[in-house]
Image (tube, rainbow, N blue to C red):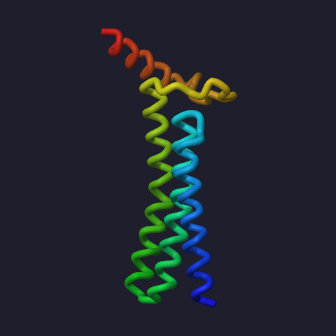
Amino acid sequence: MNDFLIMFLSTLGAIFILIASWGILKMPDFYSRLSVTIKAATLGIGCILIAAALHFSDFSVTTKAIAIIFFLFITSPVAGFLISKVAYLTGTKLWKHSIFDELKNDKDAVNLQKENQEENEK
């Protein structure tokens, strides 16, 4: 049963990582690509690390895998948010069929975007 669970989690992790790499190719804009990559790769690496912890069944390997998963799940969304916010502020365009632009009315974002545009014009 343990071997089956390890094989299942490894396969599931590989599929999530495959979906992330496929999403990089198929998504229409930077923000969609970033979202797919952050979500699918985080889940894929998490599944593979759980499978590694089950395979080795050693306390030190298990604690390291759990620590890596914890920090990965904490830092990946924050990093994705910051990368996308910086991309927006530096003028990376949204997809032409995007429905919402939630930062459009954000005063800080608008001011920073204007400053960046003025610097680029000089």
Q: Nearer the viewer, residue 22 or 109?
A: 22
Above or below for 81 versus 65: above
The residue located at (48%, 25%) in the rendering is 109
Q: Give percent across and percent down for residue 38.
A: 52, 51
Q: Give percent across and percent down for residue 28.
A: 59, 34
Q: Give percent across and percent down for residue 62.
A: 44, 81
Labels in figure, total? 0
The residue located at (55%, 57%) in the rendering is 18
Kindly give the residue lying farthest to the top in the view shown. 122
Kindly give the residue lying farthest to the right in the view shown. 99
Q: Give percent across and percent down for residue 102.
A: 61, 30
Q: Is residue 28 left or right of residue 109?
A: right
Above or below for 82 versus 108: below
Kindly give the residue lying farthest to the left in the view shown. 122
Question: Residue 5 is drawn in which quadrant?
Answer: bottom right
Above or below for 43 versus 10: above
The residue located at (46%, 61%) in the rendering is 72
Question: Residue 29 is drawn in which quadrant?
Answer: top right
Q: Nearer the viewer, residue 15 or 63?
A: 15
Above or below for 19 versus 13: above
Quadrant, the N terminus = bottom right
Quadrant, the C terminus = top left
Q: Nearer the viewer, residue 29 or 81?
A: 29
The residue located at (52%, 51%) in the rendering is 21
